[in-house]
Image (cartoon, rainbow, N blue to C red):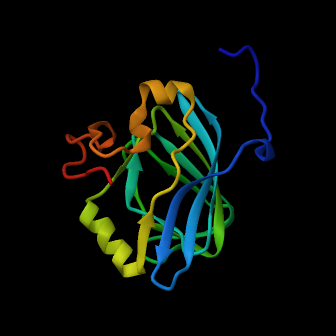
Amino acid sequence: MRGGPVIKHLDDVPWFEAVRLRFDDGHVASIWEKWIEFTPRYMAFYNKWEPRAFSPYHGHQSDHTVFVVKGELIGPEGEKYPAGTHITLEWGDMFGPYEAGSEGAELYCVLTGPGRFFASDPEDHARLLAEKGAVNERVPPYPLPPFARAADQAILKQDGDESDKAPPERFPGAVNL
C-alpha cells in the first residue's frame, strides 16, 4: 500500500514509440504510448495511434479494458469503434487486428496482472503486413520500471523468450511475434 492516492497528469508522463510501420508509399505510422502507472499488479496507459497504424490479432495475460478517447478504431470486419467506445477483454481473450481511422485514435487502457502480450501465428501477421503494404520497423527499447527490468523481461518480447506466449492449454498454436 502506498498510503494514499498517486496522482499524475498526462502531460507529466513521457511519450515513447511502441510500434512503427513503414508503408510501401514511404508513409510511416506509429503507435505512441505513455505508461501512466506500471506496477506488478496493473498497468494504466494512454496511447496515440497515427492514421493507418494497426496492431496484430493478439491478447494479453491479464484482463484488459480499452476506452476510445478520440478518433476511432476500425475492426477486422470494418466495424467502427468511435470515441466513447469501451472494450472489455478477459484474461487471454484475443482481439484485432485494429487499425486507426483517418484521424488516428487515442485510447486509455488498463491491464490487470502481468499483462504480457501474445500474438497469433506469425504467418498471419506477415500476411496482414503484406495486405497493408507495410513492414514493422524497430523502435527504441521500452522504458521499463525497475521491477519489470529485473523480473519481467518478457514485456520486451525479446527473441527466444518463451514466457510471453499464450498459455498452450487454452490457446494451442498461439505464438509470440
Q: Position of residue 17 (x, y in %)?
A: 58, 55
Q: Relative to the observer, which residue lies in front, 75 or 27?
A: 27
Q: Relative to the observer, which residue lies in front, 152 or 72?
A: 152
Q: Position of residue 125 (x, y in %)?
A: 33, 66
Q: Relative to the observer, which residue lies in front, 126 or 117?
A: 126
The residue shown at (24%, 43%) is 170
Q: Relative to the observer, which residue lies in front, 15 or 98?
A: 15
Direction from residue 136 to residue 32 in the image, left or right: right
Q: Position of residue 171 (x, y in %)?
A: 24, 48
Relative height, residue 170 to residue 98 (above, below): above
Residue at the outermost bottom position = 25
Q: Position of residue 88 (x, y in %)?
A: 52, 50
Relative height, residue 109 to residue 76 (above, below): above
The residue shown at (76%, 45%) is 10
Q: Quadrant of residue 50?
A: bottom right
Q: Quadrant of residue 133?
A: bottom left
Relative height, residue 21 to residue 1 (above, below): below
Direction from residue 5 to residue 34 in the image, left or right: left
Which quadrant holds the C terminus? bottom left
The residue shown at (26%, 51%) is 175
The residue shown at (57%, 65%) is 30
Q: Quadrant of residue 136?
A: bottom left
